């Protein structure tokens, strides 16, 4: 009887070992039963979104890769074959969310961002120059949010036309050298020069945020305009040539229509009318400097004004 029991146990153990050996992936399976893919040399390949034991800075993720766009006149070369970029009406249209590094010189053309409202776009300017003869060189038509990153040490310059040509005469956008229909952030440790010859220098329908960078902007009408808000954070900004220098004019929301200049910022303004104009509130923190000259009010807001006296050094022709 004992001998029969031992035989049965041995048979059961053998069947168990055979079943384990037939599991997909064999001994290379992951603990959750998902097969591990390997490259040509047989080494395991970490999949996007899975943990890479060697990546201690950002475990569990893979670093995003930017598509490099290099311009030469009106010609474009790219780092990958399938970029999702199409040419339409003289514009290079970005149709997919993601990160794009822009280099070289784009002459007589336009970069247009037209991605679904659920997607975000990052544009890295790395010694990028663009000029457009008929419109804005950068038009962000649709996106959830857009970010311009100025690469370290880079100098970038955008120049628009003096007269815009619209396919539909009823259209009035874009109306700035850099125009965004959605939230726009400009940041980085490089320099951006914006020459606005038609109307506004930089215009944003929603929230405009400028952080850490060096920014030089001219405009015919408003130099910087964020309809919902304008924030300048630890940035060096020079604004010249327009009517109002910094403007936010949303009036139907109490949490919008504001302008904020934080400590660490250096802003120089030379304009014809108001230096800073907002509908709801203006805040100029201690520890920043706002200098220059204006023909109108230094601060114009029917709502709340909270400006550090030492920080505000604007000479106003309207306020002797």
Image (tube, rainbow, N blue to C red):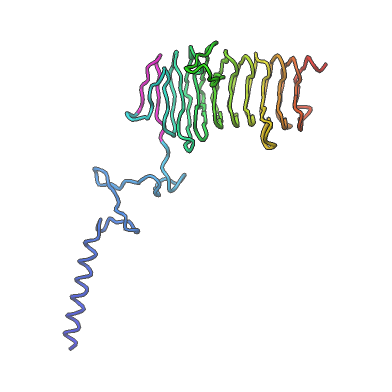
Q: Quadrant of the N terminus?
A: bottom left
Seen at 57% across and 13% down, the residue is 198
Seen at 35% across and 46% down, the residue is 47
Q: Quadrant of residue 310?
A: top right
From the viewer's perspective, is residue 95 above or below residue 130?
A: below
Can residue 233 be seen in the rendering of this structure?
no
The answer to if 74 sits in the magenta stretch is yes
Seen at 56% across and 15% down, the residue is 195
Can residue 39 be seen in the rendering of this structure?
yes
> Could you tell me what secondary structure mostly forms the magenta stretch?
strand
What residue range appears in magenta?
Answer: 65-79
The image shows residue 36 at horizontal and vertical percentages of 30, 51
Residue furthest bottom in the image: 1
Q: Is residue 199 left or right of residue 24?
A: right
The image shows residue 210 at horizontal and vertical percentages of 60, 29
Please state the total of marks drawn on the protein image: 0
The image shows residue 186 at horizontal and vertical percentages of 56, 28
Seen at 38% across and 27% down, the residue is 85
Q: Quadrant of residue 100?
A: top left
Residue furthest right in the image: 320
Q: Is residue 245 left or right of residue 196?
A: right
Q: In this view of the protein, which residue sits in the foreground, 48 or 277?
A: 277
Q: In this view of the protein, which residue sits in the foreground, 199 or 14?
A: 199
From the viewer's perspective, is residue 91 above or below residue 308?
A: above
The answer to if 91 sits in the magenta stretch is no
Q: Quadrant of the C terminus?
A: top right
The image shows residue 82 at horizontal and vertical percentages of 33, 30
């Amino acid at each position: 009887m004992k001998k029969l029991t031992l035989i049965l146990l041995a048979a059961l153990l053998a069947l168990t070992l055979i079943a384990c050996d037939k599991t997909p992936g064999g001994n290379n399976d992951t603990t959750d039963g998902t097969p591990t893919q390997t490259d040509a040399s047989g080494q395991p390949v970490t999949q996007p979104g899975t943990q890479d034991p060697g990546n201690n800075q950002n475990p569990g993720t893979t670093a995003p890769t930017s598509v490099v766009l290099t311009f030469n006149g009106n010609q474009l070369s790219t780092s990958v074959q399938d970029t999702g970029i199409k040419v339409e009406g003289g514009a290079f249209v970005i149709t997919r969310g993601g990160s794009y590094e822009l280099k070289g010189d784009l002459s007589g053309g336009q970069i247009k961002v037209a991605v679904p409202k659920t997607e975000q776009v990052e544009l890295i300017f790395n010694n990028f120059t663009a000029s457009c003869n008929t419109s804005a060189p950068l038009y962000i038509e649709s996106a959830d949010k857009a970010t311009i990153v100025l690469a370290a040490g880079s100098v970038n310059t955008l120049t628009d036309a003096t007269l815009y040509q619209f396919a539909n005469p009823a259209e009035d956008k874009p109306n700035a050298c850099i125009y965004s229909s959605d939230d726009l952030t400009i940041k980085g440790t490089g320099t951006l020069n914006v020459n606005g010859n038609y109307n506004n220098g930089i215009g944003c329908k929603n929230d405009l945020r400028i952080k850490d960078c060096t920014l030089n902007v001219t405009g015919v009408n408003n130099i910087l305009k964020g309809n919902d808000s304008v924030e300048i954070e630890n940035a060096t900004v020079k604004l010249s040539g327009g009517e109002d220098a910094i403007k936010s004019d949303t009036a139907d929301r109490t949490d919008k229509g504001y302008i904020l200049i934080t400590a660490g910022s250096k802003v120089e303004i030379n304009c014809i009318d108001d230096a800073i104009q907002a509908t709801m509130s203006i805040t100029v923190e201690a520890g920043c400097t706002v200098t220059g000259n204006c023909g109108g009010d230094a601060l114009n807001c029917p709502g709340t004004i909270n400006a550090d006296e030492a920080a505000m050094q604007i000479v106003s022709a309207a306020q002797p």
